[in-house]
Amino acid sequence: MHPAPWQTSYPPALRNYQLDTTSLLPNAGALATEGAQRFGDQPACCFILPSGISVERSFNEVEALSNALASYLVREMALQPGDVIALQMPTCLHYPIALFAAWKAGLIVTNVNPLYTERELHYQLEDSGAKVLLVADMFLKTALPAAMDLKLRVMTASLWDFFPPPVADAIRNQMMPGGAPALPPGIVRMVDALVQGHALAPIERRDHPVALYQYTGGTTGRSKGAIITHQNILATLSVTRDYLQAFDGKHQGETMLTVLPLYHIFALTVNLLLFYTVGARNVLVPNPRPVSNLKSAFERYQIDWMTGVDTLYAGLLAEPWFQANPPKVRFAISGGTALRPSTANAWQALVCPMMEGYGMTETTCIVSCSPPSAADLRTGSVGLPVPGSQVRIVGDEGQDMPVGERGELWVKGPQVVAGYLHAQQDSASSFTDGWLHTGDIAQLDADGFIRIVDRKKDMVLVSGFNVYPNEVEDVLAAHPEIVEAAVIGVPDESTGEAVKAIVVRRSEALDAQALQQYCRSQLTAYKVPKQIEFVEQLPKSPVGKILRAALRQAA
């Protein structure tokens, strides 16, 4: 076997690929400056609402706006290089502006799920050491108590901010019929910060090696922040762009549909940053549910690329308006969760080739991807490793497995992070000499294509989002009427997997509905158990460890 069989499947330009890391920019914030220089007044980002109302900003405008906000963060807020700013917003125009501004100011960004409960938000803000929270005002009621408790400075963003006044007023009245509540003292609106920033002296870009504290879960405990550097991000962009262009040629000025949330590493890296570097227009959709919210985007724009998860594509395929007038997309990329062959085949028959990719937060979102070529698509495969990466299939004894044999997937490359924030033990167990132990069981075929056989044993994947049993079990264990509980994933037609809780209760007075209501007060919706089973006792090992494998088998 070739030690790197994927090399034989690469075009000649990618064989024996070496990334020149010395050629990379020192700071991903410079991508905004470079984009303005190369693409000027071409549209960079378009924010569109389900009604079809939209607003755009060009590459020049994103550069100017991010410069203004960077000046405000440094000169008005007196933030220092290495300080942390949390972004808690849906996909909107504020996101790229705030992201580039933070990096130009030398800040570290931690992306926060807007739907987090106060408990979940408090943990991430405290663990990351955030000093500022930029939050969409629709989530302020939940966010404010956590921010006040931690003494964070708060900025707010409103989805109507960048629209002209008459349109903005109409959107505001629709979203907040009773009128927007007055902001507490000390809270500043982002649009006001931009005005003040424009009046301040510009800053020189400040470089800090760390770009993101990107939070991910873990089977060994609470969620933890992967430390993603600017070099991780810029290397990922470089190798992914080289990979796609080697198969597909160079394209500029295309349109990318961004449906996945920008707080997710996949959408942030691929949709926003990668396509920013090639002058694409990014069509930003704040909420893809219901999927009919995407109808106006497909009607208004010629979409060339889009990314999503299996359930999104299946949902679109079920829409009569989509079937009646399927868009002429060049390529769709599926990631985050396994792509069902039925979805892939139906999409490719109606719309366009479907590429499947694989990655993790710890790999700055990418390990492998199907080549953008209809001839090279292999249903069930997550494609070839991106250039500059190494992969191994490792057996239980640490040995490399032969072609076609199953084992744990290990990855090494410039996109692999160095470790986790405040989690040295997890870092030590997950990384060995630069190799990331993914915990996923995979096979490598003779042509170098990767097939994921099974996900991490305990992790539950709900519509592409990781749910880690320990966190849900901790919430359940805090309920006074629960003796003990275990959480597993079970198949679900709409979300791929669903969370199931197996519970030992103290009294039959506690029912499933009441327990789900309790969980909703503590957990984001996709983490709440969809199924609850009450039992007399849980299966355990001789040392008292709950045997989730036995529960999964019984389910």
Image (cartoon, rainbow, N blue to C red):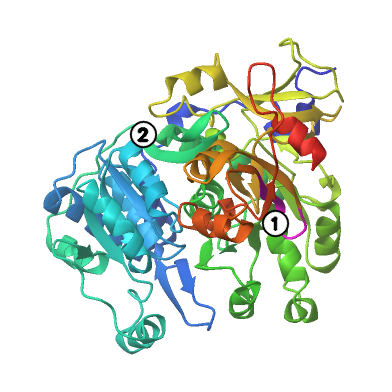
Q: Dot 1 lies on which element?
A: loop
Question: For this rendering, which residue is in front, 9 or 297?
Answer: 297
In the visual, does 277 lie left or right of 512? left
For disc 2, the marked residue is: 210
Q: Nearer the N terminus, badge 2 or badge 1?
A: 2
Q: Dot 2 lies on which element?
A: strand
How far from the left and from the top, in percent, is residue 53?
Answer: 48, 82
Q: Which residues are magenta?
A: 492-502
Q: Nearer the viewer, mark 2 or mark 1?
A: 1
In the visual, does 381 lie left or right of 188? right
Magenta span includes 498: yes
Q: Which residue is depicted at the point 84% across and 30% down?
A: 447
* Residue 3 shows up from this direction: yes
In which quarter of the view is residue 58 placed? bottom left
For disc 1, the marked residue is: 495
* C-beta proximity under 8 Å, tags 2 and 1: no
Rounded to the nearest angstrom, the CA distance separating label 2 from label 1 is 34 Å
How far from the left and from the top, in percent, is residue 555?
Answer: 79, 43
